[in-house]
Image (cartoon, rainbow, N blue to C red):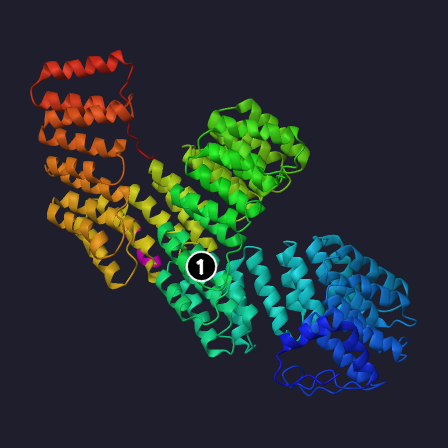
Amino acid sequence: MRSLGSSLTLKRKQSLLFANKFSFTQSLFKRKHQLCTSQSCFSSYTPIVDKDKASLVSALTFSANSKSVILGSQVHGHIVKLGFSNDTYSLNNLIKMYSYCGVLSEGLRVFGEMPERNLVSWTLIISGAIQNDDYKMALGVYLDMKRSGLMPNEFAIGSVMKVCTSMGATELGLCVHSFSLKIGMEKNPFVASSVLHMYANCGMIEAAKRVFECIDGLDTGCWNAMIGGYVQCGHAYEALQTASLMHCKGMIMDRFTFINALKGCSVVGDLNFGRQVHGLIVQSNVKLNTSVINSLMDMYFKNGEKSLALKLFSKMQDKDVVSWNTMFAGYSHDVDAREAAGLFNNFMCTPLKPNYVTFSVFFRLCGEGLKLDLGLQFFSLAFRFGFHGEPHVVSSQINMFSRCGALEMARVVFDSIPFKNINNWNEMISGYNLSCDLEALKLFRILWEFGVEANECTFSSALEACSKTGKVEMGRQIHGVIVKSGFASHGYVCGSLIKGYVKFRLLDDSFEFLDGLEKLDMVSWAVMISTLVRQGCICEAINILNRLKEGGEEPDEFILASIFNGCASIASHHQTKSVHSLAIKIGFETNVFVASAIIDAYAKCGNIESARTAFHQSSRFHDAVLFNTMIMAYVHHGLVKEAMEMFEKMKLANLQLNEATFVSVILACGHMGVVDQGWNFFKSITVDYGMEPSPDNYGCLVDLLSRNGFLQEAICVIEAMPFPPWPAIWRSLLNGCRIHGDSVLGKKAADKLLQLVPNNDAAYVLLSNIYSEDGNWDSAAKVRKGMIAKGVRKESGCSWVEIQ
């Protein structure tokens, strides 16, 4: 047989090898010709000659890398023919080849027939089993190796740690870690990084941190494992700190370092740190790596920098399907389904094809944007590409139809699934929770009768349905099922239980439930406190905070923000100062959410000076939320000049203005009576900043016009806005009619308000006041009588004084 020409490509050569299996093998080994002389096939390739073990191993390596099991089996036959059946080195490479090619059974046959096995043989079988996802076999081989008297090396121990990570076998992982300590291998970088991965995946981040601190000579793999572990366990700030420390120590960062650091930036919303990581990527030799650029785009999207993400995407040379999916998912942050669909058309013109992630993203995007017509088009396309039965796609379809109000279509999709997984059940129950809570409970009962194993999402959705429907007894029954199923101490379920009891006003039951738990995580404490605050039980929320502190725990930023919101709602100045001291003590006074809540609490307690001081102590971070809160504080105190000065400072700081900013400044214009300026602010939302006015922006504009006597203009705005009117906006117009004595328009506004909320006392009272102030006492009396006849009672006013 003639030698293959150097002009043939690697793919062509492999095709020839497959097509001429037997004739090629005979001519290859009988006539002692070259397997391949092409430099495009091998780099410095040595021709195979009889009894040349190195050439055989090179051929096996090539077979493994190209995943050509046919070529590998031909070399296997030559190994047997040349008498290398007893050579451990050759047989080890055979095992490696079969494992790489996904034919582990052949590798096991070679292993079983080996006359002499060494440590490498056992380790190759373990790693081969892991590559083929047979974790039980890997553990069995590891135990057999130890029984044979061989001492595992770092690769065997590291591989077994990976098995423990994949299986979630924490106790076994601890045993293997202890064994590595016993034989003095715990500081080996490969073993150490595997141990770190295991602890992080099992949620034992503190254990991983202790291991990390004990390792001498940390390599990049260990640093990556620690940074990734922090991100995975929800400790994004610590991940960024570790990445900074790694850079300060001069360690070389690879693509995994950058990807993990960017994930941390996405979680905490630290755009500044993300930009710094971007700079390091540009300076490094991985700047053209597709996976890194995908992570960069995702970080920019999640931090509101859509333009930068689009710029990165446009400059990418090697886009993969993940790159496109990242772009599609990025549009979910502003729910721009139509624009994303246009990008999808461009994607379909490339050689790439959509995968299940693509369709899952688009179905959820259509659901969030309430684009049912677009969702139906993607539904047909998913069917065409064969993804109609894929579990993730089906779940996102149910989600989309439910959000768009097409519950019957969602149920048809759900019923069409022959083998439903728990995620499908959860999506359908959650979909019913949006509008048909009783149906959600019925579906949960069906799930339970079918013996489907529920998870934390299932129980939480069922408890939410009980809360909405007021089914107290059924909630108690589900609580019993939760305890029986072992989910009572799960943070997510625990929070739902607490929330349900508080909503039912069964505070004693919720406290009893808290006392029955051995340890309550911070999420459950936060849910308990925030729910109590929303239900108006401020004193009880503060008591829970005290219980948390008595237990030796420190509240997080979410708990503190909830407490400050509670203090603001009851204008408790003394309590605000006390909790402010606690926030300073534990270092949360500069946290954006906590600082914003502090400013708001002081302002609503009447202490604008303390609000201003809190703002100046935290505003060095230049966050838009803080400026918006301070502007609103000034507006509520009638300090309109200071509010407008704060708005100008915000623009000079190049902060991103949002809908909340314009709510504040338009309200300020209403108090000043400068209607033209308020109109200009409203117009600038679209003209200067490219945003669509929110319902709150329209509400502020109507209030501005109504207060200042532009009643006809106000009614024109209500009729022209792209949202159906809501009670508050009619009440603003009605109040303006009272101020300016327009009984005709006031009657119309009152009728519209009563259509939406028939038992609203404000509509009757304001309309009665309009008639009274106009001297029309008969009409005023008639309104009062109609109010009494319909059983509507005016809510009594109240005031209070805080005694310190």
Residue 34 vs residue 567: left or right?
right
Instruction: Tell me which corner region of the image, top left, top right, bottom left or bottom right, holds residue 24.
Output: bottom right
Q: Position of residue 469 (x, y in %)?
A: 48, 25
Q: Is residue 436 placed above or below 220 in the rendered structure?
A: above
Residue at the spot x=46%, y=78% of the render? 283
Q: What is the total number of numbered labels drawn onto the structure image?
A: 1
Residue 119 in view, yes or no: yes
Say above or below: 384 vs 141: above
Tell me if residue 614 is in the magenta stretch: yes
Residue 765, by quadrant, is top left
Q: Position of residue 256 (x, y in %)?
A: 56, 68
Q: Residue furthest left?
A: 775
Task: Check residue 176 for magenta coloring.
Answer: no
Q: Position of residue 119 (x, y in %)?
A: 84, 71
> Residue 770 at what x, y percent from top left?
13, 24
Compared with residue 767, is residue 527 higher up or lower down, i.e. above or below?
below
Question: Which of 236 and 321 lies nearest the eye of the viewer?
Answer: 321
Residue 497 visible? The answer is no
Which residue corresponds to the image point at 44% horizontal and 59% vertical from the top-left?
348
Q: Look at mark 1 in the image and give the residue it sits on.
A: 348
The quadrant of the picture occupied by the C terminus is top left
Q: Secondary structure at mark 1?
A: helix
Q: Please give left or right for residue 100 compared with residue 663 in the image.
A: right
Magenta residue span: 611-618
The three-letter amino acid code for the residue at tag 1 is Met
Determine whether, in the image, residue 53 is placed left or right of residue 35: right
Q: Main secondary structure of the magenta part?
A: helix
